[in-house]
Amino acid sequence: ALVATVKLKGGADGAVLGNARRSLERLREFALERGLPDGGLPASPVLLNRFLIWVDAKARSANRGSQGGATVRDGVRSGLLFLARHLGLPISIGSVVAEAAAPPGRKLRRERRSGSLPIKVY
């Protein structure tokens, strides 16, 4: 019954579960770096605030993807919300303190570059 429930909540292609898994892996990495027990669970609002700031800084320093890592924090927050709301993990992501670290992201505007050389016609 548990597996069927997780599959139902995870979406048709499992993308939601994949995002949730990656978010939990990042939280565990953050907890291990700081010597926190139980992979950071239960996750308090202050811990999540620090975690989301850490995720954002790490993603932006890697500067990968079309947005330069600017949307990673929002994806991690989304994964944590799924874990808390649908699977009942003790993650206080709905708190104002936690949400302060992940305001709605702005998309970066990057300079568009032409794939071909400009040609002048005489």
Image: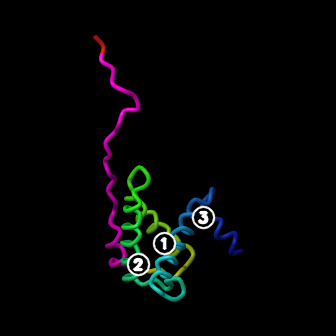
Residue position marked by numbered label 2 in the rendering: 48
Q: Is residue 28 magenta?
A: no
Q: CA distance from mark 2 to mark 3?
A: 23 Å
Q: Is residue 107 above or below residue 29?
A: above
Q: Is residue 105 magenta?
A: yes
Q: CA distance from mark 1 to mark 3?
A: 13 Å
Residue position marked by numbered label 3 in the rendering: 10
Does the residue at mark 1 contact the one at mark 3 (Cβ under 8 Å)? no
Disc nearest the viewer among 2 and 1: 2
Query: At which x and y percent is residue 117?
Result: 36, 26
Q: Residue at x 50, y 72 (%)?
A: 26
Q: Please give left or right for residue 11 compared with residue 72 in the image.
A: right
Q: Which residue is at the front of the view, 97 or 50? A: 50
Residue type, numbered disc 1: Leu
**Looking at the rendered structure, which numbered label has been put on residue 80?**
1
Category of crowding for the residue at label 3, using alpha-carbon neighbours closer than 10 angstroms: few (below 14), some (14–19), many (at least 20): some
Q: Upstream in the sequence, badge 2 or badge 1?
A: 2
Residue type, numbered disc 2: Leu
Q: Range of the magenta residues?
A: 93-120
Query: At which x and y percent is residue 3?
Result: 69, 71
Query: At which x and y percent is residue 47?
Result: 40, 82
Of all residues shown, which one is farthest toward the bottom? 37
Q: Which residue is at the front of the view, 42 or 67? A: 67
Q: Quadrant of residue 115?
A: top left
Category of crowding for the residue at label 2, using alpha-carbon neighbours closer than 10 angstroms: few (below 14), some (14–19), many (at least 20): many
- By secondary structure, the bulk of the magenta-drawn segment is best described as loop
